[in-house]
Image (cartoon, rainbow, N blue to C red):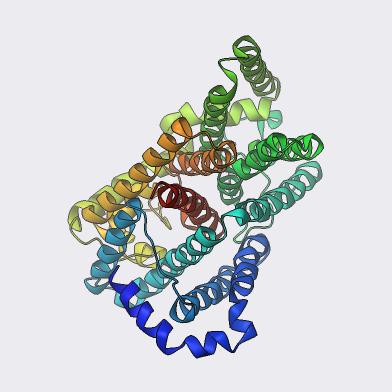
Amino acid sequence: MMFNNLFKYTQKKLNFLYENSLLLQNIDRLIFVFLIAVFLLSTVMSSEILGIVALCAIILTIFRVLITPEDKFEPNKFELWLLAYFMIVIVSLAGSTLFALSLKGFIKTFTYLGFYVSLVHYLKNHKYHIPYILGAIGVGVTFESIIGLMQNFAHVDEISTWQDVSNLNPEQVMTRVYGTLLPLNPNLLGGYFVAGISSLFGLSAMFLTDGYKDRAVIFLILALISVGVLFMTGCRGAYLGCMVIFAGLFLVGAKFLWNKYKKLFITFVASIFAIAMTAMFSLASLRARFASIFAMRQDSSNSFRFNVYQSSLQMFKDNWLLGIGVGNKNFREIYGLYMRTGFDALSAYNIFLETAVESGIFALIAFLGFIITMLKRGISFIINSDNTRDVIFVSAAVISISALMVHGLVDTVFFRPQIQFIFWAMVAVISAILNKEISNEV
């Protein structure tokens, strides 16, 4: 990379600082603290605080590369799509009619991508710390599942209108838990579980392969509890994402168990499916909530989304080249010119449509190219690699990202920082492991 030549120059000039500073020689520990803090604080802190913590990690990473001898960036091929996406977003920002609002959205995007660069650069040098990153995510998911259970048993009231009860009997009305994530919303909590639950399953599998069966069982139980609380959120998009999670778990499990334990594996999968269907049909509130997915416009939430989709598509048609500028505040201002009366919206309720509206068709192509190329390489690694531990980590990341993309078809909580940071962590896990494999081959 062009920047690596610049880094070599600064490293030579500033080498004396590195050699004479104990703090700078241990800068990785500081970076690690801030990276972990982002995940641990995401359950209770505001977006602004999380952004500041993430920026600390970014600044330290830049400083590390500037002064540490032989340090450099080594991007994977799929990250070139990400670079293209970022450049297009910059062009979209420059052409936005609401530049000030778009600039705020751009700063958020820069923070997310900068956090990703910091995390992936750290993991490429400390791949053995991947379990700690997954563990920090798992701590957050476990904390939210405990809070969710407490809210369910307390039958917390809705903060706003979260479900259409006009056609429901009292026993079909669900207590939708929302955890502590800000802003308080069950869809946000559902998306958070979709993003993070695979880390618990991954840690359980890791401990099992390492011979720590007790720890494996503990993490498996925590994962299953979190799945149960996911259904308590009533987030139908999260239900779809959860299906992707279990489909991914079964497919990865088949890689290790199909040849030797085919009948046992099929029996296990059938049992899990039977238990899930039994729970679905025995709980009236859950059954009604799931059935509402297919109610189309008969459900007010579905009808609202269809109206938003139509308005957002018209926004895209009128701004297809560069979009309106990145950011939900910018979206809301422009959306007012297109919305149907009484159907105000904060987003397009579809992450791909949102990307196209905000930054144009080429940004959407770059984003899709990034996701598809990354998942393709990750899946190829899972199929072909004999490194069980790395396969487990990549599988957890691929499953999380795939589930988020499915959830994102019907919601845009994906763009909330609590979910964004987990998403980029999963991408960083894939990038760090694939980069290590390439280095070993060379």
Residue 315, percent from left and from top = 25, 55
| Outermost residue toward the front in this view | 442
Quadrant position of residue 384? top left
Residue plotted at (47% across, 62% down): 116
Q: Say which of 417 and 259 sits in front.
A: 259
Q: Is residue 33 left or right of residue 18?
A: right
Residue 419, percent from left and from top = 54, 54
Is there any visible trace of residue 340 in the rendered image? no
Q: Taking 110 as reference, is 221 above or below it?
A: above
Residue 234, percent from left and from top = 61, 39
Residue plotted at (30% across, 54% down): 81
Residue plotted at (44% across, 37% down): 381
Q: Taking 417 as reference, is 377 above or below it?
A: above
Q: Say which of 403 and 172 sits in front.
A: 403
Q: Is residue 66 left or right of residue 146?
A: left
Quadrant position of residue 27? bottom right
Q: Taking 307 as reference, is 285 above or below it?
A: above
Query: Disc count in the image?
Result: 0
Q: Taking 272 as reference, is 421 above or below it?
A: below
Q: Say which of 156 and 320 sits in front.
A: 320
Residue 213, percent from left and from top = 78, 34
Q: Is residue 291 left or right of residue 14?
A: right
Q: Is residue 409 left or right of residue 16?
A: left
| Outermost residue toward the top in this view | 263
Where's the N terminus, which quadrant?
Answer: bottom left
Is there any visible trace of residue 196 in the rendered image? yes
